[in-house]
Image: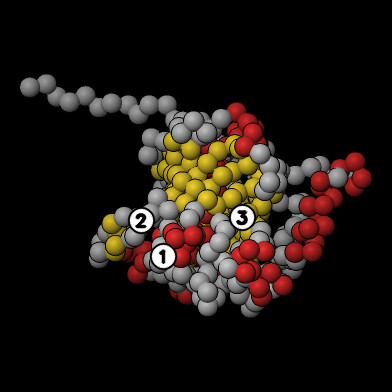
């Protein structure tokens, strides 16, 4: 009997050219849910919509940690009209959820859905489509040391090629320490990053326990490398992270589930990595932060 020969993994799937070119220059992006009039009338009539823009220079930085929506909108407006304000244009992409009313009503945070990622505004045609995300229906079953049917969301090119996926990474020890993680995998199922949430008061997670609220406006999740180690950066503001930003405004009062995020990518992230980290953001959004009708979090883990 001959010994089995180990097969080397194949080449990693790449994003299509237009999608790769769109994500390549971005070091940090903002993801903001867009208000939809139909959601005010009946929240299950339509899928969620999000704007993804490159973070305006200086926004949310400094000792005061300013996250004011008016300042953000002003910076975005200036960036969209460089000929008038003399600033560089920002990346603009939109994401629209495609799911049935039945799934939203009955399956809630476990529902199956697709995300169409387009360059331009929400009403752009199909020619602006850059890539897709798909989340299958999975109801997680937690045993003591494992999790069955872990929630996940994958990234696909327009031809259906799998680029990778984000998966909830269940760990009994992490849960006991007030932490949980999401694993980012490429098309060869090789782990690239982890997004880690920490609510343990003993390890600096006290603020996260109450965030995002008016008293604790930022909930910060670290982006770690494949070995769950933090990246070494010159300044803390440049550390790879995902932040859920609380905004006390009219839209929040009308729709408690409206969320906004800032994601700072790792310094070595490729366009494919960035698309997968965005998939992780949306997986966390739908699993952890999407609110129910009473304004309470649907925390499924």
SS assignment at label 2:
loop
Q: Which mark is residue 41?
A: none
From the viewer's perspective, is 140 left or right of 166? left
Q: Position of residue 39 (x, y in %)?
A: 61, 65
**Quadrant in the rendering for residue 242:** bottom right
Q: Which one is earlier in the sequence, the residue at label 1 or at label 2? A: 1
Residue at 71% across, 51% down:
55
Q: Position of residue 253 (x, y in %)?
A: 66, 75
Callout 3 touching callout 1 (CB < 8 Å) = no
80 is higher (above) or lower (below) than 33: above
Q: CA distance from mark 3 to mark 1?
A: 20 Å
Q: Which residue is mark 3?
A: 49
Q: Position of residue 72 (x, y in %)?
A: 76, 59
Q: Which one is earlier in the sequence, the residue at label 3 or at label 2? A: 3
Q: Which residue is mark 2?
A: 138
Q: Which residue is mark 1?
A: 106
From the viewer's perspective, is 33 left or right of 110? right
Q: Which one is earlier in the sequence, the residue at label 3 or at label 1? A: 3
Mark 1 or mark 2, which is nearer to you? 1
Q: How many marks?
A: 3
SS assignment at label 1:
helix
Image quarter in which the C terminus is found: bottom left
From the viewer's perspective, is 182 left or right of 61? left
- Pointer 1 local density, CA inside 10 Å: few below 14, some 14–19, many at least 20: few
């Amino acid at each position: 009997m001959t010994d089995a020969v180990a097969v080397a993994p194949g080449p990693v799937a790449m994003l299509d050219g237009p999608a790769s070119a769109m994500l390549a220059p971005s070091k940090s992006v903002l993801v903001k849910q867009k208000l939809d009039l139909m959601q005010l009338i009946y929240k299950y009539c339509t899928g969620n919509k999000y704007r993804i823009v490159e973070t305006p220079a200086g926004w949310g930085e400094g000792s005061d940690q300013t996250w004011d929506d008016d300042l953000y909108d002003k910076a975005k407006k200036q960036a969209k009209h460089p000929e008038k304000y003399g600033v560089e244009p920002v990346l603009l992409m939109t994401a629209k959820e495609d799911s049935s009313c039945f799934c939203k009503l009955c399956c809630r945070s476990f529902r199956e859905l697709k995300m169409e990622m387009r360059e331009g505004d929400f009403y752009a045609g199909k020619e602006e489509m850059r890539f897709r995300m798909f989340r299958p229906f999975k109801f997680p079953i937690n045993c003591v040391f494992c999790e069955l049917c872990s929630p996940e969301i994958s990234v696909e090119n327009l031809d259906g090629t799998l680029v990778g996926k984000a998966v909830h990474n269940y760990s009994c020890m992490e849960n006991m320490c007030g932490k949980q993680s999401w694993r980012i995998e490429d098309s060869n199922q090789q782990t690239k990053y982890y997004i880690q949430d920490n609510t343990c008061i003993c390890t600096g997670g006290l603020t996260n326990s109450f965030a995002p609220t008016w008293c604790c406006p930022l909930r910060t999740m670290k982006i770690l490398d494949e070995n769950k180690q933090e990246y070494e950066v010159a300044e803390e503001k440049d550390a790879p992270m995902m932040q859920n930003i609380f905004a006390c405004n009219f839209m929040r009062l009308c729709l408690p589930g409206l969320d906004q995020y800032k994601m700072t990518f790792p310094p070595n992230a490729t366009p494919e990595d960035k698309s997968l980290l965005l998939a992780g953001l949306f997986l966390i959004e739908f699993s952890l932060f999407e609110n129910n009708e009473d304004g309470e979090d649907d925390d499924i883990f």
